[in-house]
Amino acid sequence: MSETVHVIGAGLAGLSAALTLSERGKAVVVHEATAFAGGRCRSYHDASVGMTIDNGNHLLLSGNRAALDFLRRIGAEHWLVGPPGAEFSFVDLASGERWTLRFNDGPLPFWIFDPGRRVPGTRPLDYLPLAWLLWAPAGKTVGEVISCEGVLYRRLVEPLLVGALNIDPPQGSARLAAAIVRETLAVGGSACRPLIAREGLGATLIEPALVRLQELGATVHMEHQLRTVRFAADHVEALDFAGETIALDPDDAIILAVPPYIAASLLPGLETPTEFRAIVNAHFRSELPADAPAILGVLNATVQWIFSFPGRVSVTISAGDRLIDTPREELARTIWDEVARVTGLPATLPPWQIVRERRATFAATPAQDAKRPGPATNWRNLVLAGDWTDTGLPATIEGAIRSGNRAAEIIAKLP
């Protein structure tokens, strides 16, 4: 193993890489450009709502093996909550219809034969075309592989893929959609139970990881932005930070776990995704009724998913580029009107905050997916990590953590 590993970036990819190497007794130094660890999974106190909120809402599934293992290793698996089984509640804002999908645990989809468990208005044979996604040719879009119309598409496939791919599904990569189906619906309900960080992403994923890294002897530097990478032949010889240069010993190594546009600015010749999609999140200081589902999907609305937290109602809208320039108060009013209609809460707008990320994820098209690099680079002591690298998954928590683990394994095997 190399002598010291410098992990650049304290998002989940960087933290998982640092954790894996620290557990193996490696000397690890994490450098984070901002004042907060966690990247897109950070939490912070917001004055507008008067409480701690998440930068964005993130849903985990019981089949996210790398994410659940990460939580176990940092002693935080108990902070995830969800229903006892694989079930998802929906409401159609246009018709007022409500239903709950309930998947059986095994890989044989018995649930599609039960009208009380499957999507209303569908028949068992309607689900058969989803299998075509599993054998989608490389470079194809979802719209080229399956029909993007009909009741099943609108009420299950579309909300599933919009949330997972963060793109209008017909334009999305069939390869990435297949990975989602393969690791969720194709496995069965045992892999589909929804889990949320009820106490917040920071308290669940980030703060325990930082504590565990400290216990393992790792060093974490906040507000330590990497400005330049110095190269010598086939390796990196130094890292330039603001006001400091770190010369690397021959056995030192680097894991670059930063957004793709930053990685491309630091590494000459690196190809990365260049198109991105937005996610819009809204947070309201309010509380849903005690019998409300922790996660509610909403169809035929601006709102897509409503999350219930203690004292807070949060909304996520994926593929949200159309809303980026909408005036904030107008957007908050529109979202809350829909939330009030489906939950029965008062129509009066409570304290709120809108969080819009213009470059939340890379655009999950076949063309952009093809630009995702693997972990290896042209420099023997530099490895990449991040949900934008070629993990085989869309830009998700699971993909970020897998990329960090993979980068750590490569570093551990260096001579």
Image (spheres, rainbow, N blue to C red):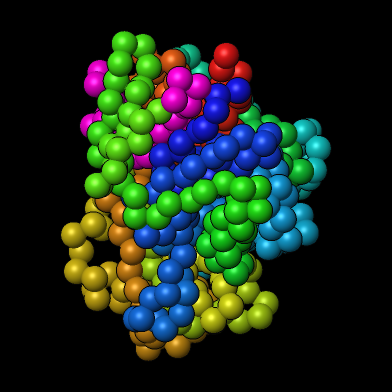
Does the magenta portion include 260?
yes
Among the 4 quarters of the image, the one containing residue 308 = bottom right
State the image coordinates of residue 349 (x, y, percent, origin top left): 36, 84
Question: In what quadrant of the picture does the N terminus appear?
Answer: top right
State the image coordinates of residue 269 (x, y, percent, origin top left): 25, 18
Task: Determine the residue positioned at 61% across, 67% down.
Answer: 198
State the image coordinates of residue 38 (x, y, percent, origin top left): 47, 53
State the image coordinates of residue 283 (x, y, percent, origin top left): 42, 72
Task: Determine the residue positioned at 40% across, 28% down.
Answer: 248
Among the 4 quarters of the image, the one containing residue 90 = bottom right
Q: Name the one closer to the observer, 364 or 144.
A: 364
Question: In what quadrant of the picture does the C terminus appear?
Answer: top right
Left or right relative to 20: residue 14 = left
Left or right relative to 75: residue 325 = left
251 over 113 or under it: above or below: above
The residue segment tinted magenta is: 249-273
Q: Residue furthest top?
A: 233
Left or right relative to 384: residue 194 = right
Task: Determine the residue positioned at 25% across, 58% down.
Answer: 323
Is residue 97 in view from this perspective?
Answer: no
Does the magenta portion include 359?
no
